Image: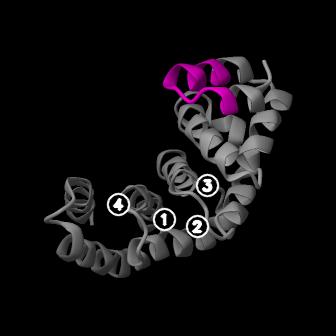
């Protein structure tokens, strides 16, 4: 299988599952996927972002070496929401190394406060919460941001309302 050609040809859940099964625990095949994800071709990167969702669920340790690269990717301009959302979801579900936790918190907190999509905000909440649980001194700041989100989006977004409420109860 050639991952790039497969991604460009077909975007489906079945394709993502086939790619993850193909990668298995092979670092060279995972690098082939990563080359697509970190590509400057926005369509290719967007399609590879969906595969990250499946990798996170199946073999998250395979992308551990790309954590700093994920952070750098988020610094690019005009990223598709799918790319940002997939990275934030990965961080929220799987975590990130201690060496980048401050930057991850800042980036994700910024997504909560800017005009990012609801999907990005929903996943960024969980990434931030990982650090709030580890560093209780961040709790008050995070609580204020969640309360602002509830006021701003709580009526129109069940995802924001549900996640914010759950996290505020934990704080």
Disc 4 or 2, which lies upstream in sequence? 2
Q: Residue at x 29, y 80 (%)?
A: 144
Can residue 106 be found in the magenta stretch?
no
Asked if marks 2 and 1 touch (Cβ < 8 Å), the reply is: yes
Disc 2 or 1, which lies upstream in sequence? 2
Tell me the distance, in whole angstroms, between the alpha carbons under discs 3 and 4.
22 Å
Image quarter of residue 9: top right
Tell me the distance, in whole angstroms, between the alpha carbons under discs 2 and 1.
9 Å
- How packed mark 4 is, by other alpha carbons closer than 10 Å (few <14, some 14-19, many 20 or more), is some
Asked if marks 4 and 2 touch (Cβ < 8 Å), the reply is: no
Looking at the image, the residue that sits furthest to the left is 155
- How packed mark 1 is, by other alpha carbons closer than 10 Å (few <14, some 14-19, many 20 or more), is many
Asked if marks 3 and 2 touch (Cβ < 8 Å), the reply is: yes
Image quarter of residue 37: top right
Tell me the distance, in whole angstroms, between the alpha carbons under discs 3 and 2.
8 Å
Q: Which residue is mark 2?
A: 104
Q: Which residue is mark 1?
A: 131
The structure's colour scheme is one colour
Residues 34 and 145: in front is 34
The image shows residue 152 at horizontal and vertical percentages of 22, 75
Residues rendered magenta in the picture: 7-20
- How packed mark 3 is, by other alpha carbons closer than 10 Å (few <14, some 14-19, many 20 or more), is some
Disc 3 or 1, which lies upstream in sequence? 3
């Amino acid at each position: 299988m050639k991952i790039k050609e497969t991604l460009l040809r077909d975007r489906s859940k079945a394709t993502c599952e086939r790619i993850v099964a193909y990668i298995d625990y092979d670092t060279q095949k995972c690098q082939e996927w990563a080359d697509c994800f970190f590509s400057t071709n926005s369509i290719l990167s967007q399609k590879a972002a969906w595969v990250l969702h499946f990798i996170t669920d199946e073999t998250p340790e395979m992308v551990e070496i790309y954590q700093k690269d994920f952070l750098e990717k988020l610094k690019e301009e005009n990223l598709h929401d799918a790319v940002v959302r997939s990275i934030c979801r990965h961080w929220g579900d799987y975590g990130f190394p201690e060496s980048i936790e401050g930057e991850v918190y800042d980036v994700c907190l910024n997504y909560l406060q800017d005009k990012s999509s609801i999907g990005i905000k929903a996943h960024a909440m969980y990434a931030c919460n990982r650090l709030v649980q580890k560093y209780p001194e961040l709790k008050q700041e995070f609580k204020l941001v969640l309360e602002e989100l509830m006021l701003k989006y709580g009526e129109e977004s069940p995802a924001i309302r549900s996640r914010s409420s759950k996290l505020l109860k934990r704080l």
